[in-house]
Amino acid sequence: MEVVGRSKAHVILESCLNDSYAYFEQHEKILQCNPYCQNVSYLPDHGIYKWIFQVEDPRKNPITALFFVEQRCELLHADEPKVNECLEVMKNKELHEGGGKRILWVNAERTPDIAIDDNHTFVGRANTEICLLHQKDNRTAVHFETDISLDFNLSFPLNMMPEGVLKFMSEAIMSQIMQQATESMLCQLQSDMCCAVPMLSVEGGKR
């Protein structure tokens, strides 16, 4: 059964684009703000990061989730559709000027061979997009979107429940986990860099 969680956040940083970008480019530092992340490590032979998360299933049993993620950094041009999508949620979009930069954490295509010897550990998929837009007042608008999916086998007695009901329950829990993780990241961001009150929305079970 596949369970999907998604979160979105928007925040204005009291720092220029280059400084904001340098902060978000620190992959391991950002992930360590997530209370469910047990470990982040870089695998140089594959050029990717390995995340180890721990969450709970609907019966409060621990689940270990592994993610293999590649980080990509690129320019975000002013005429890209993503910029207009970001502008739709900005209350001060008149301050927007030009493009910005984008950091992507994408599910890695090439991953190491791993042996999983228990029924509580799963390999999931994670994709994150962090868009940083330059503003005329030398501040930075940041749009953070992430989605995580886990596909796991149902054990007794959970497999006796209708899958639709269990999927709804599991995705509600996943959404709550995503919200807590994103809020924790933003709290750390507010501690490290001055920023305005963030906008946060959370969705589950959607792509």
Image: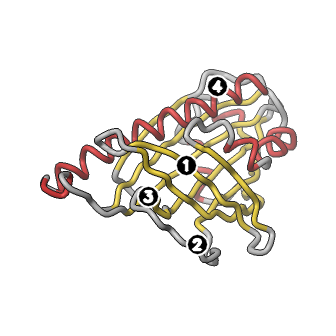
Residue 174 visible in the shown view: no
Q: Residue under circle 4?
A: 187
Q: CA distance from mark 1 to mark 2?
A: 16 Å
Q: Measured along the vertical axis of the image, is residue 196 above or below residue 170? A: above
First in sequence: mark 2 or mark 3? 2
Q: Are marks 1 and 3 in contact (CB under 8 Å)?
A: no
Mark 1 or 2, closer to the camera: 2
Q: Secondary structure at mark 3?
A: strand
201 on left or right of 170: right
Q: Residue under circle 2?
A: 114
Residue 121, position as x, y percentages in the image = 46, 59
Q: CA distance from mark 2 to mark 4?
A: 34 Å
Q: Residue under circle 3?
A: 149
Per the rendering, the mark at residue 53 is 1
Mark 2 or 3, closer to the camera: 2
First in sequence: mark 1 or mark 3? 1
Per the rendering, the mark at residue 164 is none
Q: CA distance from mark 2 to mark 3?
A: 19 Å
Q: Amino acid under label 2?
A: Ile
Image quadrant holding the N terminus, namely bottom left
